[in-house]
Image (cartoon, helix red, strand yellow):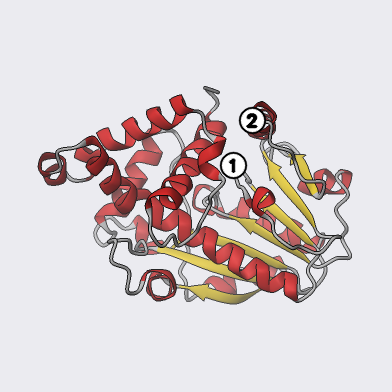
Amino acid sequence: MESKKESLTAIVSCFARGYHASNSREPIFNDFIAKSLLMDEEKQLIAANWANAIAFFDQEKSETLETFDDKLHWVMSNQTIPQLVSRARYTEDRLKAAIQRGFKQYVILGAGFDTFALRQDRLPEDFVIYEVDHPATQAFKINRLEELGIEIPENVRFVPVDFKNDSLHDGLKKSGYDEQKYTYFSLLGVVMYLDKKDFYQLLSSVSEMSVNGSSFIFDYLDDTAFDDSIASKKLTQMRQITAHTGEPMVTGFDPFELDRELQDCNMLLYENLSPANIEDMYFKGREDGLHAFDHFHFAHLVVHK
């Protein structure tokens, strides 16, 4: 398996989406491609790591759940799947609506093993998908698709960008990005790891290269997630794990101040979903024990300059 950290994160997220699609009778997000992108040894290793982590998350459950499958299911359902699948569902639901309004470009920032390009259905002939990611992760994905004999659709452009050293604008322009077309951007599972100034800089860059009305979707943590006296146990554990792996969560926002904080980025806050909103939209009435995560919010910004 590729040892680079970027690729490992992409694989783990892909595993979770595939697990949900394969094991849920009513998937919130049906990523029916994800499972096929992973090798058997990768799936076995990830499953073992998650199942063995149950004692960290809940000592009582680690003692009462006897089988490997039950332990894996509990960890995936309680610690991983809900956030991954709900943010993906939200993003693609809003994308479909944007396409109906005439959007012609989709830029997936930090694409990882995102499979939208492989699941696309009845898109306009002139619709283009740009997958932007770290060069190492992107090369790993392209190589995996070639290994599996999966044909890359003609409307997909791979854009290798190291955000610390490369220009997103330059990378997209080299790949044919059209600044005069309505564009839909997504950035999932990343903002909480960025310093605020770097996130603001990214938003400003996106607004500069986009026409008014273009969209930017992201998920974020609220500021209470960083107050150990009130943060949920689940979130505190997530912060401990990410810090241990060398990628600490560092940024949260006050949901009621988010629109004001983004004013200088030439972005308007169009939609701002709380955990309660997300619960109502995607988890209400479910019988499988899946629930929206505390502290996580979804935001939809619109370019306005």
Q: Residue at x 75, y 56 (%)?
A: 205
Q: Quadrant location of residue 211?
A: bottom right
**Can residue 274 be seen?**
yes
Q: Nearer the viewer, residue 115 or 79?
A: 115
Residue 128, percent from left and from top:
80, 55
Q: Residue at x 87, y 60 (%)?
A: 179
Q: Count neighbours of disc 1 (C-alpha within 10 A) and say few if under 14, some if 14 to 19, many if 20 or more.
A: many
Which of marks 1 and 2 precedes in the sequence?
Answer: 1
- The residue under label 2 is which amino acid type? Leu
Give the label on residue 148, or none: 2
Residue 186, percent from left and from top:
64, 58
Residue 289, percent from left and from top:
27, 61
Q: Is residue 99 above or below residue 189?
A: below
Secondary structure beneath disc 1?
A: loop
Q: Quadrant location of residue 225?
A: bottom left
Distance from label 2 to label 1 (Cα)?
A: 14 Å
Q: Quadrant location of residue 174?
A: top right
Residue 291, percent from left and from top:
33, 64
Circle 2/circle 1 CB separation < 8 Å: no
Give the label on residue 113, or none: 1
The mark total stands at 2
Q: Residue at x 33, y 31 (%)?
A: 49
Q: Residue at x 54, y 44 (%)?
A: 34
